[in-house]
Amino acid sequence: MKNFVEELKWRGMIHDIMPGTEELLSKEMVSGYIGFDPTADSLHIGNLVQIMILVHFQHAGHKPFALVGGATGMVGDPSGKSKERNLLSEDLLNHNLSCVKTQLQKFLDFENGENAAEIVNNYDWFKEFNFLDFIRDVGKHISINYMLAKDSVKNRLENGMSFTEFTYQLVQGYDFYWLNQNKNCKLQMGGSDQWGNIVTGTELIRRKAQGEAFAMTSPLIKKADGTKFGKTEGGNIWLDKEKTSPYQFYQYWIDASDEDAANYIRIFTLKSQEEIEGIEAEHNQDPGRRILQKAVAEDITVRVHSKEDLDTAIKASNILFGKSTADDLASLDENTLLAVFEGVPQTSISKESFNLLENTTDLLSEATNGLIFKSKGEARKMIKGGGVSINKNKVTEPNAPVDYSLLKDKYLIAQRGKKNYFLIAVK
């Protein structure tokens, strides 16, 4: 059994903690929760910070609750937002809820022991809670002055915020009250931007039930270069492999700076302090081998996806950055293939034209509109010099017939020199 607070402290995962929280956790098994709003049909790696906190919480012998906000998702949390979110339909929310629940079940133990994890949906206690009852039984306990003092409100007053968003902190506060009264939850956790909402819950428990509850938040992760964590040019890094392929997921962590990777290995893995310091020492002997980044990427990819997905991601990564074979290339599924070659120059050719081509020189020059070689002469010279491959097979004869097997029945990968790749789609 680990000391939960001490574990998070050395990992750099505590931002604010209410006095008395550590003492409470040291003397009894505590039920605590973190909320996840189902604004999308997948969680992303920003949510993974909170998932890891619940994992550590359970490993320390406490009982984690993951709250999926079927009700709060209909309102939209204004914390950290410069404008109001679009409200989602009930059908879309229910779909998102189902997907989020499935993802959470990969990380927490829902079956064994008295501290087995539970998933709760706040729509279950809000669906029959009418407006008049809510403002009478909840609203009267929290003053307007108290609500206006919250950063999530103050930061929006100049540009305006709707009554819907203004009341969000009361709705989330009531979640904590309900869980406290019905599930004996004494602790709510979340990102540092949630502190105001969380302490509204502790205040409601104090005023309405004369009870005592506690709060703890984690820092919002920032990358060393100032760019936003969890974002790429393509958007969020999702936990759903259909939204972010395992290759793209793996590559995100591999591309991390040394400073960021040292932070990530503490937050996103379950490795001990001793293990992490050993990996860092080995990395520092030869930073070019990226031992730290590989340790992070491999650990997280296996836990979010699978060992098989990790192996595929490494194989895909080697196609661009290391040694690989034609069989490695042919084994990739279409999504991974397109993800690997997402940034390379691409062109297309009709299947009819492809079938009429006389030789590889024509394919790599005129048929691809000069993208790969500007002229037939340039193509012939490079082929004869051994600098051209098709689907990872070297081509040495300029007049070689165009009888290459299409990857996934529609693609060819041409390689000019060691680093220049081109994707040809045959349609």
Image: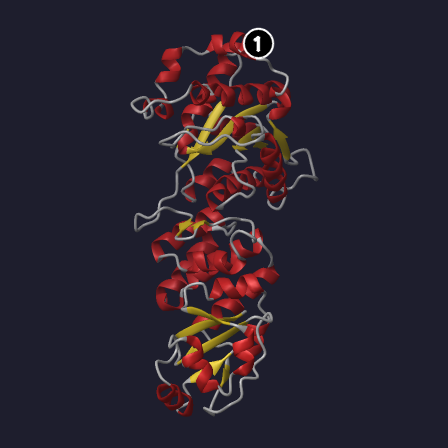
* Count of marks, rendered view: 1
Residue 423 placed where, x, y %?
Answer: 46, 71
Camera-nearest residue between 68 and 384? 384
Rendering quarter of residue 344 = bottom left
Q: Would you place residue 324 above or below residue 300 in this image?
A: below
Residue 357 placed where, x, y %?
Answer: 51, 83
Q: Name the residue under label 1.
A: 133
* Secondary structure category for the residue under label 1: helix
Q: Would you place residue 403 above or below residue 244 in this image?
A: below
Q: Quadrant of the N terminus?
A: top right
Q: Would you place residue 361 above or below residue 43 in this image?
A: below
* Label 1: how many Cα within 10 Å (few below 14, some 14–19, many 20+): few
Residue 30 placed where, x, y %?
Answer: 58, 28
Rendering quarter of residue 251 = bottom left
Going by the numbered disc 1, the residue's amino acid type is Asp
Q: What scheme was used to colour the molecule?
A: secondary structure
**Relative side of 180 to 252, left or right:** right
Identity of the residue drawn at 53% across and 10% down: 208
Q: Residue 65: tell me if it is visible.
A: no
Residue 230 placed where, x, y %?
Answer: 42, 48
Q: Quadrant of the C terminus?
A: bottom right
Rendering quarter of residue 116 = top right
Q: Residue 127: tell me if it is visible.
A: yes
